[in-house]
Image: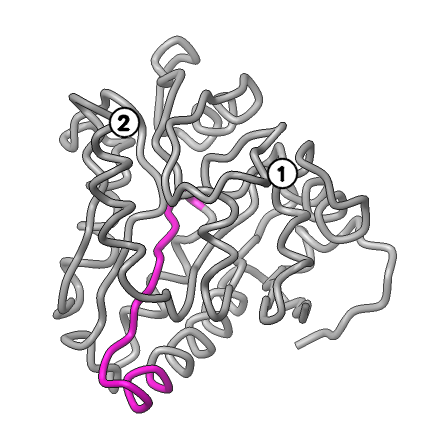
Amino acid sequence: MRIKICEDKRVLGTRAAERAAELMRSAIEEKGNARIIAATGASQFDFLAGLTAIGDLDWSKVTMFHLDEYVGLPETHPASFRRYLRERLISKVNMGACHFLNPEDNPAAECNRMGKILSETRVDVAFVGIGENGHLAFNDPPADFQTEKPYLVVSLDLRGRQQQMGEGWFARIEDVPLQAVSMSIRQILKSRSILCIVPEARKAQAVRDSLEGPITPMVPASILREHSDVTIYLDRDSASRLSKGVERK
């Protein structure tokens, strides 16, 4: 695992975007296409802005897979991750193909449908974050570290739902859905490379727990330490509680 600490979240977004583009270009050069997993949320704003601003990336050869989505939330809702990805990624580039989750009517069937597509070929690079409760995608603690199913219907814990309200996606905690469809932990770990983008002080304790505590389902993102090619991008705020010496960029 590589840990890179940047001056602020804008520099973090730029550095992570540059590395993402390198990995995508490498995959395209090697086999003619790149398959990515895209995360959402406020923590990804600067990263996606930086990535979509890179001019020499052939997006027509890129296939994107959706990481997670709320159960029962229409795409027209401001908190919909489909809407987020269309506005902040898809509308800005000439994407070759996009595979969105749509768990409004039958979440279990949607897990099966998307799982079959995702399992056809290995993902080249996954873009992920870490939740305030340590979640990875929408795998809240205690996360399932064992299942090989590509997608799961998961229950969202109170702290994770409070984060979504705190970021401004919902007006009241009662409005935040109780369930979501999420890519599983094991499926995320099957990606060739993982870039984990985690700015802001509100993530500092989760970052410390994930990087310096035990690897445990109670801190789902701690499992990233078992992957052979993970780079964690932090800013000074999100890295503020780390006790170990790390590389600063």
Residue 195 higher or lower than 247, as above or below: above
Residue in the image at 72% along x and 39% along y: 216
Horizontally, is 189 left or right of 34 in the view? right
- Distance CA(mark 2)–CA(mark 1): 25 Å
Q: Nearer the viewer, residue 156 or 30?
A: 30
Colour convention: one colour
Residue that badge 2 annotates: 108
The N terminus - image quarter = bottom right
* Residue 134 place in picture, x, y as percent: 62, 38
- Please report contact status of discs 2 and 1: CB closer than 8 Å, yes or no: no
Horizontally, is 88 left or right of 181 in the view? left
Residue 187 higher or lower than 142, as above or below: below
Q: Nearer the viewer, residue 50 or 192?
A: 192
Callout 1 crowding tier (Cα within 10 Å): few <14, some 14–19, many ≥20: many
The C terminus - image quarter = bottom right
- What residue span does the magenta drawing correspond to? 25-42
Residue in the image at 67% along x and 59% along y: 226
Residue that badge 1 annotates: 134
Q: Nearer the viewer, residue 103 or 84?
A: 103
* Residue 65 place in picture, x, y as percent: 28, 54
Q: Quadrant of residue 150?
A: top left
Element under disc 2: helix
View extreme (top): residue: 174
Q: Quadrant of residue 57?
A: bottom left
Element under disc 1: loop
